[in-house]
Image (cartoon, rainbow, N blue to C red):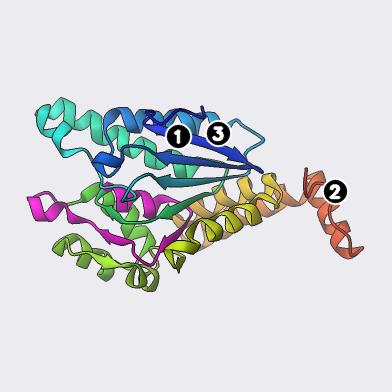
Amino acid sequence: MEGDAHSLLLRHDEAGVATLTLNRPEARNALSVAMMTAVEGSLDAIANDKSVKAVVLAGSGPGFCAGHDLRELRANPGRQYYEAVFAQCSRMMTSIVKLPQPVIARVHGIATAAGCQLVATCDLAVASAEARFATSGINVGLFCATPAVAVSRAVGRKAAMAMLLTGDFIDAAEARRIGLVNRVVPAAELDETVTALAQRIARQLPLAIALGKASFYRQLELNLAEAYRDASEAMVTNMLARDTEEGIDAFLEKREPPWRGR
């Protein structure tokens, strides 16, 4: 789905990297039901696409993502609708975590509420120096409980609660300091930096990436002994893969593995 300029979500594939761009610039890429459906559909397709080694999630226009579409929510008041919307958002976020390929958030402008949740959910995040982040629901009387799930797993508890209780914006440097993003670069270098990172990941063995990503998120929810058992099994499964054997042999023989560049 390359999509045209009117699509809610644009997809562009190049050199093993699929870039998904939220495309509601006039609404700061707010997550309408239709937008979340488009993202879910694209992630489902990418999960089964062996040509895709890494994913970049970006936003069009002046900001990354302003969170849920509050106008849409207020136009459909009622428990049943609200339950459906937040369940869909939770599904979409979970699908990023479960995706075999790593997902990199390319963040510019604002990332607020569920938009900040998106950044926290992605495996990696690179931000422009002008980016700003907030879990700002509290400012309209709505505690960002679902964004808190991702944010609290990405940053320390005190930092997460400060964002959640005040709704204040933090700048990109502070987001980097607390662990919400990996790197901060000048706006002019954002695309180059994200592309280089995505292509670096795309050169690695997809099997190892998929096994490792799944193991990483599983072990976070386990106690120490269970985490080591689970991680050890992941290592065994990885070691038994023929491509991994070839990779180790190539390292010992000081040559490139045959799967690199496939």
Q: Which residue is mark 2?
A: 258
Q: Nearer the viewer, mark 2 or mark 1?
A: 1
Q: Which residue is located at x 46 percent, y 67 percent?
A: 185
Q: What range of the chain is rendered magenta?
A: 114-142
Q: Which residue is mark 1?
A: 10
Q: Which residue is mark 3?
A: 46
Please tell me which of labels 2 and 3 falls first in the chain.
Answer: 3
The residue carrying pointer 2 sits among few (fewer than 14), some (14 to 19) or many (20 or more) residues within 10 Å by Cα, namely: few
Looking at the image, is 148 positioned above or below residue 98? below
Q: Is residue 120 left or right of residue 188?
A: left
How many numbered circles does the render carry?
A: 3
The residue type indicated by label 1 comes to Leu
State the image coordinates of residue 98 (x, y, percent, origin top left).
49, 41
Looking at the image, is 87 positioned above or below residue 210? above
* Quadrant location of the C terminus in the rendered image: top right
Q: CA distance from mark 3 to mark 1?
A: 13 Å
Q: Is residue 97 left or right of residue 34?
A: right
